[in-house]
Image (spheres, helix red, strand yellow):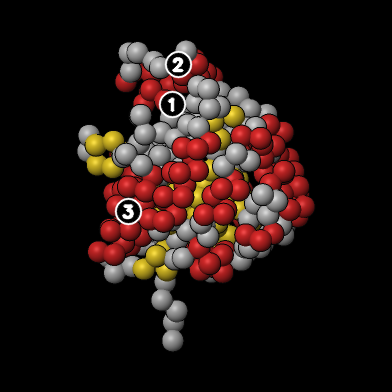
Amino acid sequence: MARERKVIITCAVTGSIHTPTMSPHLPITPDEVAKGAIAAAEAGAAILHLHARDPKDGRPTPSADVFMQFLPRIKQQTKAVVNITTGGGHGMSLQDRLQAPLKTKPEMCSLNMGSMNFGLYPALNRYKDWKYEWEPQYLEASRDFIFRNTFKDIEYILKELGEGCGTKFEFECYDVGHLYNLAHFLDRKLVKPPLFVQTIFGILGGIGVDHENVMHMRTIANKLFGDQYQWSVLAAGRHQMPLISMAAIMGANVRVGLEDSLWLGRGQLAESNAAQVTRIREILAGLSLEIATPDEARELLDLKGGDRVAF
């Protein structure tokens, strides 16, 4: 008998895209990140995707010391898979971005599958007054910024984190070419299935939010990876819930969280990450889809287990 499909919910708790002015609910301090992540796990998120911020002013930070102020707490109070960014934030070097992952050796990390323009500057038009001086400067800098992920960078991360730490990856694919980049590494046996392929829609510089693009990315991923991958979808901003709901019907796992969208509905700021997890869980239930527990996610993705991390 075919095994019934379980949907993995990932929650991206704070990220490095949104700035404090944009929402009073964006987790900033280690305590806020911990509380937000724990509540999201209690609401049904099997995977928690985590960035860190400077508690003084909310700017993204790669500091392993800041990560260690919330990682042990999340591990102690949830069974969720902890997934640490290797993308960091705009302007960070590769070594900056790997500070926390290499120290903490998590079960999972994100890994962007190509260099790209990553435009945040349109948000400058939405706000007149800023809580911190760094915010408009950070957004404007994205107008002339390339998010670097060369083949050499990716090889290095796969070797140091994948081989060296037993970490598996959320392969972030912002465009069709990124799927082919991942297939290249699969052909070279530098990555091993099952792959967790996160297709991302709506970032300026990546593929757009048209539903035809979701279907096309699924078609190409099926062609390249067959039954060797788990598919997941995230969409930016107001497109989050509609697009991931469509994708869930098509067989996708889903990602929510305040990193990807500050909204719960039209004109309604999400007051927490847990609120978004609860909303997508309700949608999945309405579609007669069951959600995966953290241990079911570990089995589906062949993860090393939470007892083999360094935090």
Query: Residue visible at 51% across and 56% down?
Result: 78
- How far, Cα to Cα, is label 3 from label 2? 31 Å
Cα separation, mark 1 vs mark 3, equals 24 Å
Of the numbered discs 1 and 3, the one sitting upstream in the chain is 1
What secondary structure is found at the residue carrying circle 2?
A: loop
Do labels 2 and 1 touch, CB within 8 Å? yes
| Residue at 53% over, 36% down | 30
Q: Specify whether 109 is left or right of 161.
A: left
Q: Three-letter amino acid code at disc 1?
A: Thr
Of callouts 2 and 1, the N-terminal one: 1
Q: Amino acid at mark 3?
A: Thr
What is the x, y in percent for residue 224? 56, 60
Q: Which mark is residue 19?
A: 1
Question: Which residue bears the numbered disc 3?
Answer: 278
Pointers 3 and 2 in contact (C-beta within 8 Å):
no
Q: Disc 2 versus disc 1: distance between alpha carbons? A: 9 Å
Q: Which residue was labeled with disc 2?
A: 132
Q: Is residue 169 visible?
A: no
Does label 3 or label 2 sit earlier along the sequence? 2
